[in-house]
Image (spheres, helix red, strand yellow):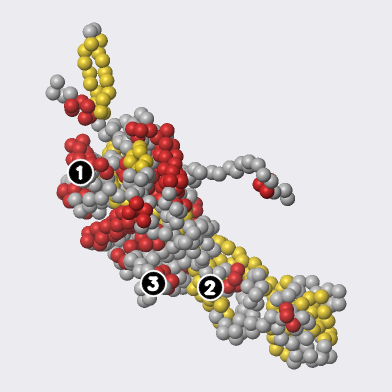
């Protein structure tokens, strides 16, 4: 290596004095908390398609709105959302998975459980089958029983479970330690002490004068749901440490997301998991397998009857909480706090209402034909159990849950709450009184309220069934579609609503004016244009934060700068650091200006960035504080466009102007 700077002369070294690049963050990702038929409880799962949602959480269910919200989100242009299933954790009546025992001659060996709690697991059945992967005869072995000579080593491998049989003696189970085709030996104790496993033991107690039958055995587990085969797990072993050991091949469901890193695993779970029940799993044992016997899983509970406010919102964490305590508090809304990419938040199932069970008419009695032989008695048909119903939450609980949504959005400042009006607000006899009273409970720029509910085709209600659902899922999809197509600066309104038959009730023009003035966004049918979201206002009384797009744009800018300026921590508070911080913020804001996200024709009219000695005096720098002031002029939507029509000579002149311009000249 030649050191060019060792010789006398002038050398050049490139130094990058600019700040790291800042890119706008993705704002279209939503999070929904609610009731599902299956799936992990209080674990956020990323979903990017309806098929992915059904594989994790099942389809639509009459006891919840979560599936309808997710489908409304996807159908209206949303691409990615996080889903959190909620259920009661009461030890007596809370959510529990269905299970069944697989036993052998010595007692229970494995417990097979549904992969997630819920009564859906009660519809699972198991069929266990034994397979002989290898068969050989042994005529001799060493005196200590550490190995046996066999006529074939095919199908025998290290860790194989082997049934050893001899006429006149009961069968026993052993584990193969090594298979050597060259010498024709099957070792029961590995010759290398370092490689020996806990389950290895010598083969003794058999008559050496008579042949011994050796059979390598594993099992297949067939899982069916209501008669339809779901999975077939082949080659399962009862020997710990092997690749196909049951509890290893079908382990309990791992969290799909790491809360610390945000790394996601969106693969669909297996329908069942296996739990070891033996005190010493290294003692070789077998299973009683009969293909003709179907074993049904029982004991699954959805945990809906005892659903409470705590299950929906969780509990505040404390800095000194241990892992177990923190996990118990991280429920419902608290489960999505760690997912930092979330930009929209909805909890539709706080409005869920019990559904009356449908009772089918009894079938007419069967009158046997006297000319035929007496038929064999048929088993009475078993009716499906009535689904457990969640409670109808009182308005006080609905308010507290929505207040927690708003609190989380204000605290994290990176997401926006989409609130649904309570079911009581849909009463036509009350007019708009209920929804306006509900709106008056909130004063925040981090939430919006959409009225009324939507009517959708109910996939589980039979042909022609229609169901009323909260609009937050559909609204989230329209907001996400606007962000993806144009940008977060564009007001997410005046878009047609997909996957709906219409609103739960009509909104007259005079009612729309009252709702809009109060900050309630209306879903209204416009002649020839279908049902549309005609409103983009927040629930804030501050005119500066009146519009949804302004609030969300500023949240995106603040979060992007927060991430991009992390490098400045522990940097010297000098001229170079201030210049780099100014450059980082300027690059982001200049890109937003060029994309049309900010008001003003020039960058000077759109934003400013200050980080100099004027706002960083010596007393501030002495305590290690660096202040970067950023001013932004966000573009605001034209809610009212006025057409000014006047006669000019022998023609008509039509001009468009904002409402405030028209009002200013109205008196002229």
Q: Residues within 10 Å of mark 2 (few under 14, many from 20)?
A: many
Q: How many marks?
A: 3
| Label 3 secondary element | loop
Of residue 590 and residue 202, the one placed in the foreground of this image is 590
Q: Which residue is mark 3?
A: 321
x 46%, y 46%: residue: 576
Q: Tell me where residue 429 appears, x and y as whole percent.
A: 16, 48
Q: Is residue 126 left or right of residue 664?
A: right
| Label 1 secondary element | helix
Q: Residues within 10 Å of mark 3 (few under 14, many from 20)?
A: few
* Outermost right residue: 182
Q: Is residue 24 visible?
A: no
Q: Which residue is mark 2?
A: 112
Q: Tell me where residue 250 appears, x and y as whole percent.
A: 57, 68
Q: Is residue 321 left or right of residue 12?
A: left
Whether residues under marks 3 and 1 lie with C-beta atoms below 8 angstroms apart, the answer is no
Whether residues under marks 2 and 3 lie with C-beta atoms below 8 angstroms apart, the answer is no
x 41%, y 69%: residue: 327
Q: Which residue is mark 1?
A: 518
Q: Tell me where residue 94 appears, x and y as whole percent.
A: 37, 71
Question: What is the number of the mark on residue 443?
Answer: none
x 27%, y 48%: residue: 445
Say whether disc 2 or disc 3 marks the residue closer to the N-terminus. 2
User: Marks 2 and 3, Cα distance to the nearest angstrom?
Assistant: 33 Å
Q: Residues within 10 Å of mark 1 (few under 14, many from 20)?
A: some
Of residue 414 and residue 117, the one placed in the foreground of this image is 414
Q: Nearer the viewer, mark 1 or mark 2?
A: 1
Q: Nearer the viewer, mark 3 or mark 1?
A: 3
Q: Is residue 45 visible?
A: yes
């Amino acid at each position: 290596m030649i050191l060019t700077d060792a010789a006398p002369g002038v050398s050049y070294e490139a130094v990058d004095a600019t700040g790291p690049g800042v890119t706008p963050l993705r704002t279209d990702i939503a999070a929904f908390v609610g009731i599902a038929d299956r799936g992990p409880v209080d674990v956020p799962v990323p979903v990017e398609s309806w098929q992915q949602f059904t594989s994790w959480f099942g389809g639509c269910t009459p006891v919840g709105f979560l599936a309808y919200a997710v489908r409304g989100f996807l159908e209206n242009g949303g691409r990615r959302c996080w889903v959190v299933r909620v259920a009661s954790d009461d030890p007596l009546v809370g959510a529990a998975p269905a299970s069944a025992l697989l036993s052998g001659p010595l007692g229970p060996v494995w417990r097979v459980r549904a992969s997630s709690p819920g009564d859906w697991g009660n519809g699972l059945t198991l069929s266990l089958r034994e397979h002989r992967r290898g068969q050989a005869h042994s005529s001799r072995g060493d005196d200590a029983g550490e190995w046996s000579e066999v006529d074939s080593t095919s199908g025998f491998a290290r860790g194989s479970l082997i049934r050893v049989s001899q006429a006149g003696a009961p069968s026993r189970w052993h584990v193969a330690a090594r298979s050597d085709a060259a010498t024709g030996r099957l070792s029961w104790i590995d010759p290398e002490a370092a490689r020996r496993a806990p389950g290895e033991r010598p083969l003794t107690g058999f008559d050496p004068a008579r042949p011994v039958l050796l059979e390598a055995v594993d099992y297949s587990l067939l899982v069916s749901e209501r008669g339809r085969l779901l999975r077939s797990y082949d080659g399962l072993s009862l020997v710990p440490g092997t690749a196909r050991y049951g509890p290893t091949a079908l382990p309990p469901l791992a969290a799909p997301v790491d809360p610390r890193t945000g790394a996601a695993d969106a693969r669909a779970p297996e329908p069942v998991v296996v739990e070891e029940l033996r005190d010493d799993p290294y003692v070789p044992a077998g299973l009683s397998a009969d293909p003709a016997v179907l074993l049904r899983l029982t004991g699954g509970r959805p945990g809906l009857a005892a659903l409470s406010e705590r299950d929906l919102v969780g509990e505040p964490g404390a800095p000194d909480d241990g892992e177990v305590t923190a996990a118990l508090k991280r429920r419902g809304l608290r489960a999505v706090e760690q997912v930092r990419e979330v930009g929209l938040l909805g909890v539709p199932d706080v409005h869920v209402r019990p559904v009356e069970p449908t009772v089918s008419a009894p079938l007419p009695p069967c009158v046997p034909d006297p000319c035929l032989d007496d038929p064999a008695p048929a088993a009475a048909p078993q009716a499906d159990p009535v689904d457990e119903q969640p409670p109808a939450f009182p308005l006080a609980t609905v308010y507290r849950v929505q207040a927690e949504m708003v609190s989380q959005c204000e605290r994290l400042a990176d997401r926006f709450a989409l609130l649904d009006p309570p079911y009581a607000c849909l009463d036509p006899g009350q007019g708009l009184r209920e929804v306006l009273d509900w709106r008056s409970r909130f004063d925040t720029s981090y939430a919006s309220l959409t009225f009324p509910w939507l009517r959708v085709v109910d996939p589980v209600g039979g042909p022609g069934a229609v169901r009323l659902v909260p609009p937050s899922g559909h609204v989230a999809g329209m907001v996400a579609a606007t962000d993806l197509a144009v940008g977060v600066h564009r007001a997410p309104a005046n878009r047609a609503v997909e996957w709906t038959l219409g609103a739960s009730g009509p909104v007259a023009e005079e009612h729309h004016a009252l709702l809009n003035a109060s900050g309630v966004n209306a879903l209204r049918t416009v002649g020839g244009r279908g049902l549309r979201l005609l409103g983009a206002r927040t629930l804030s009384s501050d005119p500066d934060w009146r519009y949804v797009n302004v609030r969300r744009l500023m949240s995106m800018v603040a979060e992007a700068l927060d991430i991009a300026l992390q490098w400045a921590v522990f940097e010297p508070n000098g001229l170079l650091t201030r210049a780099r911080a100014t450059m980082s913020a300027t690059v982001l804001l200049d890109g937003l200006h060029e994309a049309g996200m900010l008001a003003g024709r020039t960058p000077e009219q759109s934003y400013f960035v200050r980080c100099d000695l004027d706002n960083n005096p010596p007393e501030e720098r002495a305590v290690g504080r660096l202040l970067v002031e950023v001013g932004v002029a966000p573009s605001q939507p034209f809610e009212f466009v006025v057409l000014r029509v006047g006669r000019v000579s022998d023609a008509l002149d039509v001009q468009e102007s904002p409402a405030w311009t028209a009002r200013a000249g109205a008196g002229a």
